[in-house]
Image: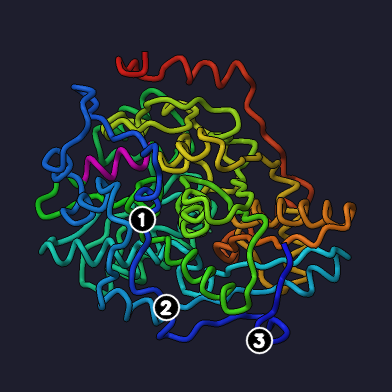
Amino acid sequence: MQNTTKTGKIPYKIYLNEEEMPKTWYNLRADMKQKPAPLLNPGTHQPMKAEELSAVFCEELIAQELDNDTAFFEIPEVIRNFYKMYRPSPLVRAYCLEEKLGTPAKIYYKFEGNNTSGSHKLNSAVAQAYYAKKQGLQGVTTETGAGQWGTALSMACAFFGLDCKVYMVKCSYEQKPFRREVMRTYGASVTPSPSMETEVGRKILAEHPGTTGSLGCAISEAVEKAVSSEGHRYVLGSVLNQVLLHQSVIGLETKAAMDKYGVKPDIIIGCAGGGSNLGGLIAPFMGEKLRGETDCRIIAVEPASCPSFTRGVYAYDFCDTGMVCPLAKMYTLGSDFIPSANHSGGLRYHGMSSTLSELYHQGLMEAVSVKQTEVFDAAEYFARVEGILPAPESSHAIRVAIDEAVRCRESGEEKTIVFGLTGTGYFDMMAYEKYHDGKMSDYIPSDEELAICRNKLPKVASEG
Ligand SMILES: Cc1ncc(COP(=O)(O)O)c(C=O)c1O
């Protein structure tokens, strides 16, 4: 798409000022004609009501979760002030990358790694901690995969004076001891999952001795801990509608920055674990697409080792391995699927956001899966050219952005490519080390392996 520069050459970094930061979050569901399927009660298979969710989640977050119609939610002033500690985040025009690739494409990335937690997760952590505090709770429990979400929540809980109990996927706990210490610095208690602390953890360990854990297992443990602890609720760092809502701040800032220079994206790319950064980045652009105002390609990038969109099925499934959570309709590999212990901890989730799943199902976005070594090729290339050391998760988006830019070089097209650089990789150096030592492998699950887990999906009558 033609870039008509309104105010001259586009700077390397476009920064909004604090007054230009969004005052509302945007709820993409309001513009969807076909809404995402509702969460179902796992016992009755009826849509979950607010009162049924209240033992697990905070009240205002439930209201946000169930609201498919309100387009804009005001961002409370306390949260806006907290955001100012690290937002607005820059939208970077990757001139060095463009030059190195010799592409006519214009590449932009929205950099969310400039806070201590190192990723976009803080955008929702502070919101969720705020509503927990407002409800008068004592603390929250959660899971963490790569550790970014746990770190972000620890920071947010420290700010509001809340207890924070984190179940960390065992392989990440072992690969990233310093992540754990950062969380403890902010006052959180961190347990490797599955653990012997909860009934569901003990059950999973009995069935899968020696398992390195998964996000699905850690979620089950955190939910059990929340419902069995007075004054506690469970909070989740991705997948849920409310999390996508909070993350819309990424897309709203991106759009505001691009609008300043009259730039429109042709392709938007984001990595997809549970879908929160991608859902947030694309929100206002997808809104325009849904309203028929503009169009662009949107690409979700997932690891070939955990290919929920590209090889999963669109069906109701449990959000967790222990089957204690509501059923969500999503692209899933089956809640029993335990991905191999690869290094993109934050993308090792068997399912996907219901909202993104519905958009993908309607053909409004695309998905691709990429192999781990190819992701690290892109990560290293990007670090050397653009200077930022990217998180392995974010590097999935880098991989596909580079591939698209190379395609433009071949076709001569001057496309505008935007991708989400969700975080930094300082705590992922063991993965980088494996890559540099040639010890990194590309695990791809077989069709048989996927079929076993798919056959265990719950049977939901409305699904036929
Ligand atoms: C840096 C980073 N990017 C992306 C993700 C993927 O999560 P989501 O799909 O919810 O954005 C994670 C998850 O932990 C992460 O840590």
Counting from the top left corner in percent of width and height, residue 143 is at 36, 49
Q: Earlier in the sequence, mark 1 or mark 3?
A: 3
Disc 2 packing (10 Å; few <14; some 14–19; many ≥20): some
Q: Nearer the viewer, mark 1 or mark 3?
A: 3
Identify the secondary structure beneath mark 3.
Answer: loop
For mark 3, what is the residue?
7
* Relative height, residue 299 to residue 8 (above, below): above
Q: Is residue 167 visible?
A: no
224 part of magenta stretch: yes
Could you give the CA–CA distance between mark 1 and mark 3, rounded to whole angstroms?
31 Å
Q: Earlier in the sequence, mark 1 or mark 2?
A: 2
* Mark 2 sits near ligand 1, with its Cβ under 8 Å away: no
Under mark 2, the amino acid is Met
Main SS, magenta residues? helix
Q: Earlier in the sequence, mark 3 or mark 2?
A: 3
Could you give the CA–CA distance between mark 3 and mark 2, rounded to whole angstroms?
20 Å
For mark 1, what is the residue?
27
Identify the secondary structure beneath mark 1.
Answer: loop
For residue 21, the mark is: 2
* Relative height, residue 319 to residue 80 (above, below): above
Q: Which quadrant does the C terminus fall into?
A: top left
Under mark 1, the amino acid is Asn
Judge from the rendering whether residue 403 lies leftward or rightward of residue 175; answer left or right. right
Residue at point 85%, 63% (across, down): 103
Range covered by the magenta-colored residues: 217-225
* Relative height, residue 328 to residue 249 (above, below): above
Residue at point 60%, 49% (across, down): 298
